[in-house]
Image (cartoon, rainbow, N blue to C red):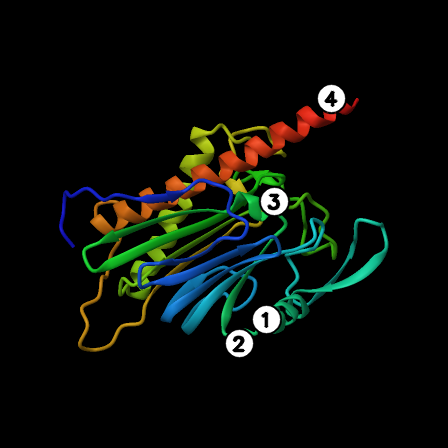
Amino acid sequence: MRGNGSTSWFLHTSYMIGLNEQFGELVNVQVERSHCLISFKQCLTILSNAPWLGGYQNDVKGILNLNVPKNAPQHDRNTATFTDSVNSKEQYSIERSFAQQFKELELNIDHIGLMTAASMDSFRSSYTQVGPYELLCCVTSGLANARRVGDPADFDEFNSAELKIPCGTINIMVVSNLPLTPTAQTEALLLITEAKTAVCYDNNVLSRSSSLIATGTGTDVSLIASAQHNETQNTFDFCGKHTRIGEEIGKGVYYAVSKSIQACIDKEIEERKNNYNND
């Protein structure tokens, strides 16, 4: 990869529902109201904190970002009770939700699964090519549970079995054919977090708990997907802020998160206007 160069980022900023687009030779992205599906052209290696197949995973074929009820709990990977919009008790299962969606979409279960109560209207993406490599960042955002790191906890897992907070979630999915080592992937997750926090700061996003500038939400998921490498392939061991890879990941995430959060803010402003006009 060349140094001190300039890269053009293609940004999606328009209405995204119904999107079905191929990005280079890397992925195909579909966006519906119920989900966002990112299908890889080749199996990739992923590091994430996703609720379904989180951690370090090889031979992954895609990512499913699933829209869920606003009060569906995300802290319990098995089952939990929640109250739906008509105040009736139902049993909610993360596994069952993904299994049902995988079946409907005719997918194998070897997809990483993310969840969000945020509208898919907030979906935004950025894409670029650097030499032979491609970088795509996809984001959905909700800010109802914006928090600053160190805010008082909403849930005490040692003394309580229920979590009752507003759901938002900033889900960030970075996909590339760069052959990153596990160390570089870990560094990429740090960059993703820094870029998200910079966007929150620059947009004066406030914690709904402390009213200080938020650093994200309480349920964010970050994901980095990169090429599976072999013994004959050169790998990238680092991607910090001094590197070209780090620069490009940082720019792409910042751009996409900025547009997604702005869409979320615009929607909140419009809803407040409508509520004011109806009063």
Residue 9 at x, y percent in the picture = 30, 44
Residue at numbered disc 1: 102
- Residue 205: horizontal and vertical position, in percent? 52, 31
Whole-percent x and y of residue 213?
51, 30
Q: Position of residue 194 (x, y in %)?
A: 39, 43
Which circle's residue, 2 or 3, is located before the other in the chain?
A: 2
According to the image, label 4 marks what residue?
Answer: 277
Q: Secondary structure at mark 3?
A: loop
Give the spatial CA distance, label 2 vs label 1.
6 Å
- 195 displayed left or right of 74: left
56 in relation to 17, above or below: below
Assess whether mark 1 and mark 2 are in contact (beta carbons under 8 angstroms). yes
- Looking at the image, tell me whether mark 3 or mark 1 is earlier in sequence order: 1
Vertical placement of residue 201 versus 33, above or below:
above
Marked residue nearer the N-terminal end (1 or 4) = 1
Q: Give the tally of numbered discs.
A: 4
Q: Which corner quadrant of the image does residue 176 belong to?
A: bottom left
Pick the quarter of the image with the N terminus: bottom left
Q: Nearer the viewer, residue 210 or 83?
A: 83
- Residue to which mark 3 is pinned: 168
At label 3, which amino acid type do we have? Gly
